[in-house]
Amino acid sequence: MVNYQRLMNALGYQFKDEKLIKLALTHRSVSGNHNNERLEFLGDSILGMIVADYLYHHFPQEKEGRLTRLRANLVKQDSLAIMARELKIGDYLSLGAGELKSGGFRRDSILADALEALLGAIYLDSGQMAICRDCVLGWYGARLQEVAAEPVLKDPKSRLQEYLQAQHLALPLYAVSEVLGEDHNQTFQVQCTIEQYPPVQGIGSSRRHAEQAAATALLKLLGVE
């Protein structure tokens, strides 16, 4: 039986029902029906609200657009994976044989999803948003203050849309052209099309990431970046 005490100490929360922490760390490659995806869904929403609330109250001088970009920077996969590594979440993940063999415990997407799932589990176990907030603020630490001092670029899709609107051109069309791999380790290929230019392709571990990659490629084609 896995001892989660060290992880709970790192998280700043002691679970009353350890079945929840076990579920939060169970990847879908282990079980199609008993995995952390639902907890991840819940945790993702809670995380976004807590970060938005913090930014709203601590940066009253910032406008909505800037706050949105700050939040996106804080809750993006890369940022969550960094925190997950600091908490050593990868040491406790339950993965299927394929993910274990491919080093899934090091993959950003799996680590980020597990961190969100743990937040969802903390909410269900405690029933208190205030406890979730304390945990999240502890995980981020000084990053919440430092993020406002850093320049935050808009994501590629937003930059592409703004550029096309400024040029009075039609907005881009995104379409999934191919999905490869098994359910627990899929790769998406998305085609992005605008008028008067050949379509470009983007590849990512989710449709959203593939769309951002396609937008980046189109920005380069247009000479915007």
Image: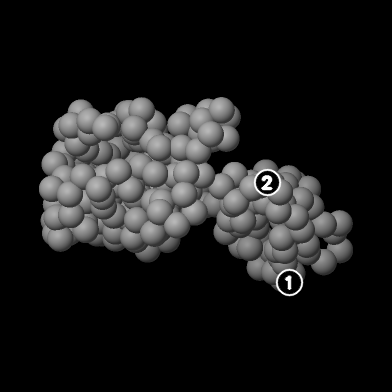
Give the foreground label among 1 and 2.
2
Q: Which residue is mark 2?
A: 181
Q: Earlier in the sequence, mark 1 or mark 2?
A: 1
Q: Residue at x 56, y 47 (%)?
A: 184
The N terminus - image quarter: top left
Q: Residue at x 39, y 44 (%)?
A: 26
Question: Can residue 167 be seen at all in this image of the molecule?
Answer: no
Q: Local crowd at mark 2 within 10 Å, few (<14), some, or many (≥20)?
A: few
Q: Out of 96 and 191, give the one closest to the viewer.
A: 96
Number of marks: 2
Helix, strand or loop at label 2? It is loop
Question: Can residue 138 be seen at all in this image of the molecule?
Answer: yes
The C terminus - image quarter: top right
Q: Which mark is residue 170?
A: 1
Q: Quote the CA–CA distance across marks 1 and 2.
A: 33 Å
Q: Residue at x 47, y 29 (%)?
A: 106
x then y, percent, for residue 123: 21, 56
x then y, percent, for residue 4: 23, 33
x then y, percent, for residue 18: 21, 45
